[in-house]
Amino acid sequence: MSRQTFLKGAAILGLAGLLVKIIGAFYRIPLAYIIGPEGMGLYQMAYPIYTTLLYISVAGIPTAISKMVAERIALGHRRDAHRVFMISFKLLLILGIITTVLLLLATPLLALYLKNQKSLYAFLAIAPSLFFVSMISAYRGYFQGMQQMIPTALSQIIEQLGKLIFGLWLASLWMPKGVQYGAMGAVLGVTISEVLAFAMLVVTYNIKRHDIRLAVQRDFNRRYRERKESILQELLRIAIPITIGGLVIPLVNITDLMIIPRRLAGLGLSTQQSTELYGYLTGYANTLVNFPQVITVALSASLVPAISEAAILKDINGLQEKANIAIRLTILLGLPSALGMAVLAQPILQLLYQTLTAQQLAISSQILEILAFSIIFLTLVQTSAGILQGVGKVGIPVINLFWGALLKIVMNYVLVGIPALNIRGAAFGTIACYGLAAVLDLLAVARYTHIKFNAASFLVKPAISAGVMIAAVWVLYRWLYVFLGSNSIATLLAILVGIIVYGLMLMAIGAVTYNDLRQIDRLKGMADKLYRMGMLR
């Protein structure tokens, strides 16, 4: 059986993750066209409950399987490695059945609590996917433990393509019957995509089964055999802490689902109006706010391993340098993304969601103008959490995010109940959540890496560059819109020019240096060219 190197495997998963995010982004935009704001609200209502049950059943288990399988293969104990997979598979089978049945039984109660019977259909459509995702997790963990990353990557891509094709098709097919059926079709596309991914992994396993059996047989004469109980105990010991950490945000999303629509209803809004406002927040604004994460996730994937290596080698100077660059580049990317999306909120929404009415566009824009500022904090949370994990402080980001989540719950309850703010109060709650978590994470990074944050390079220079960019973008957009009469062309050209202006400003005032870009493998060639041209210091 061929074995891929760790770096090659990480690259495969990284590229698959990037492609998955791109496909997911393209899925949401036409979906919003098809099912509208109320449909997006119904679609989003199903997800917090679904993701929480999913985290409870599978969150830490694939990681535990991967770790345990890899350790046993390294020792030559392939028989026990396969037993880890078989025991985990049975455990996940049971958990998948339990969570699926729980959601099916709870669906009428959830619809009753939400005071929205239309949400019933989305919950019913997504429940079976819990079973299939549980099975998928067992296969992914096993393949990753054997350093076979391609099956996981392909299954992730199949999931997104299945959701894109079947979700949009069923949503458009059933939308004429009612918005609840359109949302149900979109959610059912998710379940179908999981069935396809599961089928692909089963076929892959059967193809490799002969090689697996031969490897197990070569190890069959070993006298020692691990007890099933000890394997199960080790599996749970590894998986449970990871699961607890991963549950923070899904649980917060559930509280949003439970608090926001009811607080809006308390303001005298109808069920349809409350659902639409919830859809503007979660289905429109949140989707756009998540776009910049594609860049920061790729950045973290390149830098965090270098930080981990420096920590293992006790290279304090190298560790501090990598952490410094990681945070600074995150600010350099997150700050213009936040400001740009806030300033161009309405033009961007109008470009992407052209079926929105003037009133719908105005409401969505008001939410995005506020929520956009969470981008800088969210990206900092991602990067600083990666740094802390690299130095072995895995629990700190989880605790910090927990405190941020508590603040968000309180602020959502208070602010959404204020008539002048209503749904916009939830956007302020999100900013507070990630803002607090980012500050606490950065303090922890400073404590455990002993880096010093230089105000000029970390904040002043990026802020000046972003300020010039925003001024250029806003003036250019207004001029182009008046001159051309096209929002689409004006928005796209303004964004393109903004990127160029921001990049030139960063190089002109020394906010980005030659050494900064050289730290990222994919940018080394560009850094060399810009340095020779005299554009980098």
Image (tube, rainbow, N blue to C red):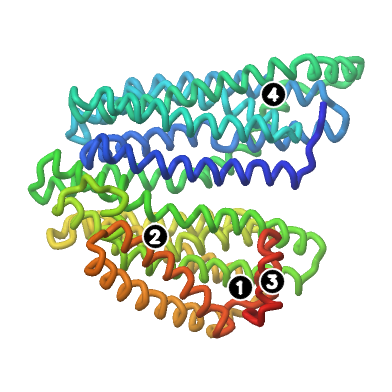
- Dot 4 amino acid type: Phe
Image quadrant containing the C terminus: bottom right
What SS does tag 1 mark? helix
Q: Residues within 10 Å of mark 4 (few under 14, many from 20)?
A: many
**Gap between marks 3 and 4, in whole Å?**
49 Å
On the image, which quarter does residue 42 sit in?
Answer: top left
Residue underneath mark 2: 433
Ranked by sequence position, the earlier of labels 3 and 1 is 1
Q: Are marks 2 and 3 in contact (CB under 8 Å)?
A: no
Taking the spot 35% from the left edge, 58% from the top edge, the residue there is: 430
Residue that mark 1 sits on: 446
Instruction: Give the residue pinned by disc 4.
Output: 85
Residue 529 numbered tag: 3
State the CA–CA distance, disc 2 to disc 3.
Answer: 41 Å
In which quadrant is the N terminus drawn? top right
Q: Which mark is residue 298?
A: none
Per the image, label 3 sits on a secondary structure element best described as helix
Q: Which residue type does callout 2 highlight?
A: Cys
- Counting residues from the N terminus, which is met first, the one under dot 1 or under dot 2? 2
Residue at (22, 42) in percent of width and height: 37
